[in-house]
Image (cartoon, coloured by chain):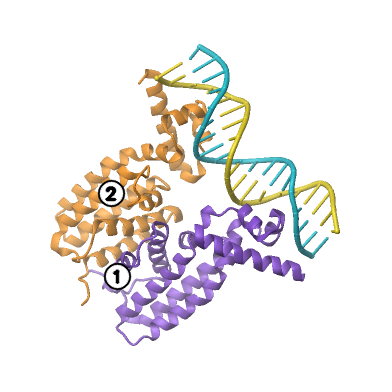
Chain colours: A orange, B purple, C cyan, D yellow
Amino acid sequence: MRADARRNRDRIVEVARDLIRAKGYDAVSMDEVARTAGIGAGTLYRHFPTKDALHDAVIEAWADKVNEAVDQAMELDVPARDRLLQWLKDYTAMLTTHQGAAARITASLGVAGSPYEAKCQTYLQANQRVIDALGGQLRPDVQAMQMCRLVGGVAAVADNSELPPEAVSAMLEVLTDGFLAPKAA
Amino acid sequence: MRADARRNRDRIVEVARDLIRAKGYDAVSMDEVARTAGIGAGTLYRHFPTKDALHDAVIEAWADKVNEAVDQAMELDVPARDRLLQWLKDYTAMLTTHQGAAARITASLGVAGSPYEAKCQTYLQANQRVIDALGGQLRPDVQAMQMCRLVGGVAAVADNSELPPEAVSAMLEVLTDGFLAPKAA
DNA sequence: ACCTGAACACCGTTCAAGT
DNA sequence: ACCTGAACACCGTTCAAGT
């Protein structure tokens, strides 16, 4: 890749990240990204074939942090409930920084060929690791996909209603207790 | 209102309902609604100032059914957990018939002046009635708004991923147990 | 009063032409 | 190879002109 192309690519992602954080995915147009980055629309599309693909690149850094968050939460020296809750909070916090990401990743769960497929995998694996770490403390029928959907749902709501942290925590506590509770006979 | 206007209005809502059920809110254009209803675009906008306003009218009938569903579920002669679960299932079932409704109503919760405001009120009151009916069996800090958001989140996920009923039930069971569980000390 | 349909603004995406 | 920017298709919404 030529040096100027590389520079353009990096600049696009940076500009897009800032714009999306400030205004949300839907409110940022591709034209605005191109104009702010000081390039033509064609260049933008040469690097990223669709708006979703650009969004995926913007979220890229997030994927690494997810696994860190799992490790940190699972290593805490507190009861299972608190470790689980900590992970759920970290996750929603990370996703709500990228406005619009929670809804899109959650909607892509299980959809083959979506631009967010890699992120979905990361997210699924993260939750699987949480399930493995907490072992028998969780209800026996929890599945990673299910956790992803439930937490993603909460994150999406928190995201586009811009809820205060307490409101999000309260919802996540309900989920936490639901995940821990034994299945009724 | 003139007879022909009345007829047009009814026809618009009917056509829009069928189209949205079949293809989902986003995939139906206002032009398509007008064309299918056999009227001009201007007429459509004379009756409904925005696409959301039309959607709200399409969902209108749903609002009545919500309260029926609460009554039926609360009158069942079964444990609190089962009554709660029944209501949650009924609610998500109703909302997923109108593709795209769950996400929009949930997103409008607490947003003053949204076109879905009346539906949000109905929905909030319904959940408040559930909370009242189940009284002390629920965790002490549940709030109607919180239930609306959590259930709306699940419904939204179920809706746009078109999940099978079992997957939805499984998620709602987690929520149910979460709502019932006593808050940890 | 109510209807029509061409027109506008905006946005995601493409492509012929340039270096 | 990579870039530019005009152009296209589509969609929500408006409005001048008709009955």
Kindly identify which chain the residue marked by label 1 belongs to: B
Q: Which residue is pictured at 39% across the width and 66% down the height?
A: B151
Kindly identify which chain the residue marked by label 2 belongs to: A
- Label 2 to label 1, Cα distance in Å? 22 Å
Q: Residue B12 location, x and y as percent?
A: 64, 63
What element does badge 2 sit on?
helix
Count how many numbered circles sit on residues in the image. Answer: 2
> Does residue B137 appear in the picture of this structure?
no
What element does badge 1 sit on?
helix
For residue B91, side relative to residue B29 (left or right) = left
Q: Circle 2 sits on which residue?
A: A123
Quarter holding the N terminus of chain A is top left
- Circles 2 and 1 on the same subunit: no
Q: Amino acid at mark 2?
A: Tyr
Q: Residue furthest bottom?
A: B77
Q: Circle 1 sits on which residue?
A: B173
Q: Amino acid at mark 1?
A: Glu
Label 2 Cα neighbours within 10 Å, binned few <14 / some 14-19 / many ≥20: many
* Image quarter of residue C9: top right
Q: Which mark is residue A18?
A: none
Q: In front here: A142 or D9? A: D9
Q: Which residue is pictured at 36% across the width and 61% down the height?
A: B163
Q: Which residue is pictured at 42% across the width and 47% down the height?
A: A99
Q: Residue A134 location, x and y as percent?
A: 16, 58
